[in-house]
């Protein structure tokens, strides 16, 4: 039975950030239990089964909705279906929310590196931090978020949100664009995350003796920063990663799977 494994969630808000990027907010049929940084498996019902994929949850566990920041993959199986969703449409969410990409509380300095939608788990952690602090928790954590994208429009609403949060003193937010020649008025950082991470981590004193690094999103960035941070003497166990896809997915030999290959049939 589908109710045993999944519940429904209704689309209540959608922000089209760019032609290939959107923020989706859903009202889940049931109260959710998860840790900031985890991911949900969401899907759409089709031909008696469900097509589903994992997505990091942007919202905090304290918020009453489920938010996702999604990139449309041309020729992909699920994302074109998500793009068809209108307000009031429903998706299916697996009851079990999983993942180990959450805040490492052994350290109170957190170096967070994200390509575009990879900022999702960090937003969840930062919203949670803000809410807990507003409720009176005495938190000593300091965060440095370096958010990379080709162009500034791809940061979506999170540019303004993180900019506002950074005024609180516990967050340094550095959006960086890799195509600055297209935006001569851009005042932020320029270059890829790999180009700027050492400079800012050193300047703000996030290092292997006092910080945990988290890299999320594009596998190329994750691989590159792992090398960079290792050379900067971050111990292996202080570099956490969440890759959103594999660069060379041999299962598909560069061809996206067909819907029938990925359809999960439900009893
Ligand atoms: C733990 C986890 C969390 C994730 N969180 C997010 C998230 O918050 N937001 C988000 O947009 N995605 C996220 N993803 C990726 C997501 O699960 C899907 O893989 C992605 O949305 C593509 O799904 P699809 O069915 O449209 O494409 P598929 O049919 O599954 O993929 C088609 C092909 O495109 C490749 N591919 C998949 N994603 C990309 C990409 N972004 N760029 C280029 N090629 C790609 C695949 O490897 C495959 O070869 C996450 C993945 C994991 C493992």
Image (spheres, rainbow, N blue to C red):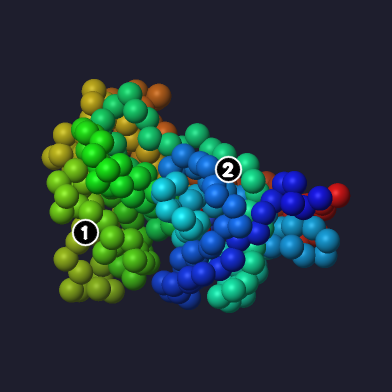
Q: Distance between the residues labelled 1 and 2?
A: 29 Å
> Of the numbered discs in the image, which one, if any, rests on residue 63?
none
Residues at badges 1 and 2 in contact (C-beta under 8 Å)? no
The image quarter in which residue 161 lies: bottom left
The image quarter in which residue 27 lies: bottom right
- The local secondary structure at tag 2 comes to loop
Report the residue at 44% width, 43% height from top.
37
Q: Where is residue 105 in the image (x, y as percent from the top left)?
A: 34, 28
Query: Above or below — where is 217 with respect to 137?
Result: below
Q: Name the residue under label 1.
A: 164
Instruction: Mark 1: give few (<14), some (14-19) or many (20+) Cα within 10 Å.
Output: few
Q: Where is residue 71 in the image (x, y as percent from the top left)?
A: 50, 63
> Is residue 256 visible in the rendered structure shown here?
no
Q: How many marks?
A: 2
Judged from the image, the quadrant occupied by ligand 1 is bottom right
Front residue of 21 and 226: 21
> Is residue 251 visible in the rendered structure shown here?
yes
**Among the two numbered marks 1 and 2 on one chain, the one whose residue lies closer to the N terminus:** 2
Report the residue at 21% width, 59% height from top.
164
Front residue of 72 and 46: 46
> Of the numbered discs in the image, which one, if any, rests on residue 97?
2
Instruction: Mark 2: give few (<14), some (14-19) or many (20+) Cα within 10 Å.
Output: some
Looking at the image, residue 23 sits to the left or right of residue 248; the answer is left
Front residue of 143 and 137: 137
- The local secondary structure at tag 1 comes to helix
Tell whether circle 2 marks a residue whose Cβ is less than 8 angstroms from ligand 1: no
Looking at the image, residue 178 sits to the left or right of residue 87; the answer is left
Q: Where is residue 255 in the image (x, y as percent from the top left)?
A: 69, 59
Query: Above or below — where is 125 with respect to 85?
Result: above
The image quarter in which residue 72 lies: bottom right
Query: Above or below — where is 63 with respect to 14?
Result: above
């Amino acid at each position: 039975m589908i109710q045993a494994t999944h519940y429904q969630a209704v689309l209540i808000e959608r922000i089209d950030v760019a032609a290939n990027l959107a923020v989706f907010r859903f009202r889940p049929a049931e109260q959710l239990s998860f840790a900031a940084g985890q991911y949900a498996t969401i899907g759409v019902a089709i031909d008696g089964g469900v097509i589903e994929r994992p997505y990091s949850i942007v919202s905090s566990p304290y918020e009453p909705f489920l938010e996702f920041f999604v990139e449309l993959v041309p020729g992909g199986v699920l994302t074109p279906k998500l793009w068809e969703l209108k307000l009031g449409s429903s998706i299916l969410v697996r009851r079990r929310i999983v993942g180990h990409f959450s805040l490492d509380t052994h350290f109170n300095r957190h170096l967070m590196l994200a390509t575009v939608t990879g900022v999702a788990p960090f937003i969840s952690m930062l919203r949670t931090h803000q809410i807990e602090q507003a409720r009176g928790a005495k938190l000593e954590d300091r965060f440095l978020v370096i958010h990379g994208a080709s162009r500034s429009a791809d940061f979506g609403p999170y540019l303004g949100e993180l900019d506002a949060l950074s005024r609180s003193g516990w967050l340094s937010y550095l959006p960086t664009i890799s195509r600055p020649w297209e935006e001569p008025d851009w005042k932020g950082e320029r270059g890829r995350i790999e180009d700027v991470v050492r400079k800012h981590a050193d300047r703000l004193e996030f290092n292997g003796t006092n910080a945990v690094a988290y890299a999320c999103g594009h596998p190329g960035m994750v691989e590159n920063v792992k090398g960079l941070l290792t050379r900067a003497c971050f111990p292996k166990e202080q570099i956490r990663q969440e890759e959103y896809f594999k660069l060379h997915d041999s299962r598909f030999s560069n061809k996206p799977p067909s819907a029938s290959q990925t359809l999960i049939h439900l009893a």
